[in-house]
């Protein structure tokens, strides 16, 4: 099991829950010393591989907001879900993002005092970009704010479309009451 993981990604072996070797190291050192050494190992990796670290950071960021479409995450298959159900899950995870971005832009333009919410949405995930890979559940704390901004963005788009349609009818001479 460990040999297969080592071939896939050497850094993925670094957790005592997934590697017997790491668990033995953890058990012999104790938690405090293990964490100190793991931190030092991580910092050395970042210093020696800044491009790799940046690439991993950007991949985690993309995965956090847009989920994993690579097909590498087979957790839905393990649950016995069909591809169509898994695809719907992927779609649902990314659907609010463009509307959220539009809602944020509108809220900032209108100077509605959304800075604390925006700070929350953008800063909380940074810890997960740096430390965690592939755990979409870490997005749950920011999803209520995402939905808030997405709702604002979506409803603003609907109102904009409605105004344009009404303007076309008025321009064409048709009487439209709103």
Image (spheres, helix red, strand yellow):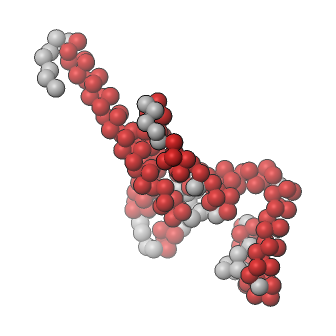
Left or right: 122, with 11 as reference point? left
Q: In this view, does 28 lie above or below 110?
A: below
Residue 164: x and y, percent?
Answer: 29, 22
| Residue 151 seen in this snapshot | yes
Figure quadrant of residue 27: bottom right
The image shows a total of numbered marks equal to 0
Quarter holding residue 8: bottom right
At a point 42% along the width and 44% down the height, the residue shown is 149
Residue located 66% across and 80% down the image? 17
Q: Where is residue 127 in the image (x, y as percent from the top left)?
A: 64, 58
Which residue shows up at 26% across the image and 28% down it? 162
Residue 164 vs residue 110, the one in the foreground: 110
Q: In this picture, is 122 found above or below 31?
A: above
In-image side of 178 versus 7 (left or right): left
Q: Is residue 95 visible?
A: no
Quadrant including the C terminus: top left
Residue at image position (80%, 88%) is 28
**Which x, y percent locates residue 29?**
81, 85
Q: In which quarter of the image is the N terminus?
A: bottom right
Which of the 4 image quarters holds residue 47?
bottom right
Residue 142: x and y in percent read: 49, 55
Residue 8 vertical placement versus 123 (above, below): below
């Amino acid at each position: 099991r460990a040999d297969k993981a080592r071939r896939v990604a050497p850094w993925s072996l670094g957790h005592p829950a997934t590697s017997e070797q790491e668990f033995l190291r953890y058990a012999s050192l104790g938690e405090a010393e293990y964490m100190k050494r793991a931190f030092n190992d991580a910092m050395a990796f970042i210093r020696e591989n800044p491009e790799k670290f940046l690439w991993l950071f950007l991949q985690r960021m993309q995965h956090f907001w847009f989920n994993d479409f690579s097909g590498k995450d087979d957790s839905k298959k393990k649950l016995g879900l069909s591809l169509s159900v898994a695809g719907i899950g992927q779609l649902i995870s990314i659907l609010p993002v463009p509307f959220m971005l539009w809602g944020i832009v509108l809220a900032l333009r209108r100077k509605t005092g959304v800075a604390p919410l925006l700070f929350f949405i953008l800063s909380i995930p940074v810890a997960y970009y740096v430390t965690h890979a592939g755990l979409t559940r870490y997005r749950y704390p920011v999803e209520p704010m995402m939905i808030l901004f997405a709702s604002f963005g979506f409803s603003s788009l609907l109102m904009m479309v409605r105004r344009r349609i009404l303007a076309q009818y008025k321009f064409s001479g048709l009487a439209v009451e709103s």
